[in-house]
Amino acid sequence: MSQVTKRALENSLKHLLLKKPLNKITIGDITEDCGINRMTFYYHFKDIYDLVEWVCLEDAKKALDQKKTHDTWQQGLLQIFYAVRENKPFILNVYHCIDRGQAERYLKPLTDQLLMGVVEEEAQGHHVRQADKEFIARIYSYCFVGLMLDWVKDGMHEDPKDLVDKLALVIQDDFSMALSRFEF
């Protein structure tokens, strides 16, 4: 029942975002649209931004679905781009109502999850500390998040496949090389 309620809250939020900006939506608006009481909302989320973050993470989980390996990271990143574009009204509304740091906070867990899978796979056979693997994944994550946020800021006009293909050309084989530099 918990997931059903969370999905209903997600749908209400997305529905309301088609009508007005995020900073004009109240918890009362969401609960009224959803047909639940305020306490039910607070049982699941501490505030609207907590709901927004949950929605972003859930959408990303669906987009990534087993695409966290060296051979599939491009597909995973491309799926994140497509999921963002599919939710364009939601994403643009949220983007324009929060600061870039908060947007980064929503996107980083998505890309971190994708990249840690790649780094862990590539680290097999290398003797690299876990902290160093996390550092490498974080560096790539900053690159991915920056690229995504610039794309959103520019109105999502560029073809995501072109962006991901260009990025792949820039970082081709870099995961393994970075890991080899951290070997002990």
Image: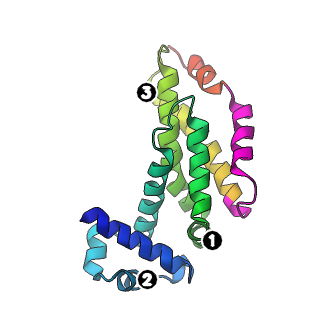
What's the amino acid at mark 3? Gln
Segment colored magenta: 152-172
Residue 130 image label? 3
What residue is shown with label 1?
96
Sequence order check, earlier mark of 2 and 3: 2
Mark 2 crowd level (few <14, some 14–19, many ≥20, 10 Å Cα): some
What's the amino acid at mark 1? His
Residue at 38% across, 85% down: 28
What's the amino acid at mark 2? Thr
Q: Is residue 1 above or below residue 27?
A: above
Residue 77 location in percent, x, y? 59, 44
Residue 26 image label? 2
Residue at 52% across, 49% down: 108
Image-quadrant location for residue 170 = top right
Sequence order check, earlier mark of 2 and 1: 2
Query: What's the distance in space between the residues labelled 2 and 1, CA to CA?
Result: 17 Å
Mark 1 or mark 3, whichever is nearer to me? 1
Mark 3 crowd level (few <14, some 14–19, many ≥20, 10 Å Cα): few
Task: Tell whether position 159 is magenta.
Answer: yes
Residue 63 appears in the picture as rendered: yes
Image-quadrant location for residue 30 = bottom left
Residue 110 location in percent, x, y? 50, 48
**Tag 1 secondary structure:** helix
